[in-house]
């Protein structure tokens, strides 16, 4: 396999590794001439010594090597794995190449104000254990309105009556032009029946309330997932404010405490995560970074690299 880069990844990169952390490796490979000509370029090759039915142990190794084309796509889409790889320091490198050095030289061209995967991941985790009453109250207001209506009615029939607030609002129409309404992260088309929407929101209301109560008691919290959410938010803030990302992270000591469940969720973790999310979303709105990646630049970059490596 023609390796463009291979590096140590995961907790060892972020500075949050413990004695129980497994070892992750990520990389990029250049496809063969045949794969390019036949249009059969695989997305990645992966290997793990861990068992599928259980979590990895400190003795396990995970390796995932992305194809050159797919990695560029991931980076253009602002996917967290690609952005992390782009900022891995030299000491994490096992193999490198001139192509990788050229990618790193131009990595700023992947920066946009819409670091969607970072923000979406952190937002989902923040909402999972959130303590803000506004979220559950928003769901309750919508439920109270819907339960007064005929379940067979379509959402479009009461569209103008639906509450609009922090956690309930209209979002962009779907690809078919259908209007959509979002409640606490759950989206509904205007064609959905009220009878379809009610049980979904009831389940959210009941589950969310239970999770919030348990979180207040530091119970049933996936501390590793919460630390990942915080990490994603911190990384987004760093890119939006400094137009760079440095590993290991400055916030690694705090993330380690969160990951190991050493802090009180209600008073020491949730307020940080929620205020951080608000800050990041505000920064994203006001950022001077471009709205989208210059895909033409990266398309040409791929063509030039493939021609040089495989056809010259």
Image (tube, grey):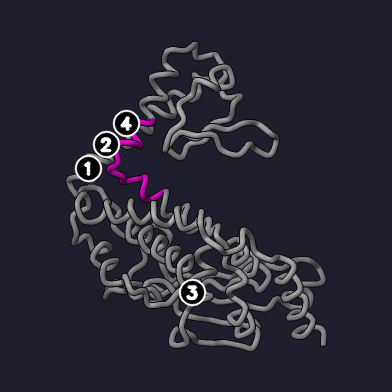
The residues tagged by marks 3 and 1 sit, at their Cα atoms, a distance apart of 37 Å
Magenta span of residues: 124-138
The residues tagged by marks 4 and 3 sit, at their Cα atoms, a distance apart of 41 Å
Viewer can see residue 197: yes
Whichever of labels 1 and 4 marks the residue nearer the N terminus, that label is 4
Residue 206 has which mark? 4
Q: Quadrant of the C terminus?
A: bottom right
The residues tagged by marks 1 and 2 sit, at their Cα atoms, a distance apart of 6 Å
Q: Answer above or below: position of 243 versus 207.
A: below
Q: Quadrant of the N terminus?
A: bottom right
The residue at which mark 1 appears reads as 214
Q: Answer above or below: position of 30 versus 251.
A: below
On the image, the x and y values in percent for residue 155 come to: 55, 21
- Asked whether, in this view, residue 168 is left or right of residue 27, the answer is left
The residues tagged by marks 3 and 2 sit, at their Cα atoms, a distance apart of 39 Å
Viewer can see residue 59: no
The residues tagged by marks 1 and 4 sit, at their Cα atoms, a distance apart of 13 Å
The residues tagged by marks 2 and 4 sit, at their Cα atoms, a distance apart of 6 Å
Residue 210 has which mark? 2
Whichever of labels 3 and 1 marks the residue nearer the N terminus, that label is 1
Task: Give the foreground label among 3 and 1.
Answer: 3
Residue 37 in which image quadrant: bottom right
Residue 19 has which mark? none
Q: Answer above or below: position of 248 versus 110.
A: below
**Proximity of marks 1 and 2: CB atoms separated by less than 8 Å:** yes
- Asked whether, in this view, residue 47 is left or right of residue 73, the answer is left
- Asked whether, in this view, residue 102 is left or right of residue 113, the answer is right
Q: Nearer the viewer, residue 153 or 52?
A: 153
Q: Secondary structure at mark 3?
A: loop
**Proximity of marks 2 and 4: CB atoms separated by less than 8 Å:** yes
The residue at which mark 3 appears reads as 244
On the image, the x and y values in percent for residue 227 come to: 33, 61
């Amino acid at each position: 396999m023609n390796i463009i880069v291979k590096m140590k990844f995961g907790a060892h990169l972020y500075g949050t590794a413990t004695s129980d952390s497994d070892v992750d490796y990520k990389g990029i490979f250049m496809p063969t001439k045949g794969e390019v000509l036949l249009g059969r370029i695989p997305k990645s090759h992966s290997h793990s010594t861990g068992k599928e039915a259980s979590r990895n142990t400190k003795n396990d190794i995970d390796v995932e090597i992305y194809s050159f084309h797919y990695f560029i796509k991931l980076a253009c889409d602002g996917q967290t794995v690609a952005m992390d790889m782009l900022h891995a320091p030299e000491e994490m490198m096992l193999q490198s190449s001139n192509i990788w050095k050229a990618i790193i030289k131009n990595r700023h061209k992947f920066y946009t104000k819409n670091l969607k995967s970072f923000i979406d991941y952190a937002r989902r985790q923040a909402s999972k254990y959130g303590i803000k009453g506004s979220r559950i109250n928003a769901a309750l207001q919508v439920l109270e309105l819907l339960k007064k209506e005929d379940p067979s009615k379509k959402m479009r029939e009461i569209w103008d009556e639906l509450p609009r607030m922090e956690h309930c609002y209209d979002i962009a129409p779907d690809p078919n032009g259908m209007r959509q309404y979002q409640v606490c992260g759950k989206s509904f088309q205007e064609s959905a029946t009220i009878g379809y929407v009610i049980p979904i929101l009831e389940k959210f209301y009941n589950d969310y309330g239970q999770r919030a109560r348990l979180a207040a008691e530091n119970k049933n919290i996936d501390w590793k997932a919460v630390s990942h959410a915080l990490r994603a938010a911190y990384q987004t803030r760093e890119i939006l404010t400094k137009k760079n990302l440095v590993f290991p992270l400055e916030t690694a000591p705090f993330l380690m405490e969160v990951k190991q469940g050493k802090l009180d969720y209600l008073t020491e973790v949730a307020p940080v995560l929620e205020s951080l999310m608000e800050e990041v979303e505000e920064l994203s709105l006001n950022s001077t970074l471009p709205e989208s990646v210059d895909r033409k630049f990266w398309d040409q970059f791929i063509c030039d690299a493939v021609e040089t490596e495989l056809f010259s």
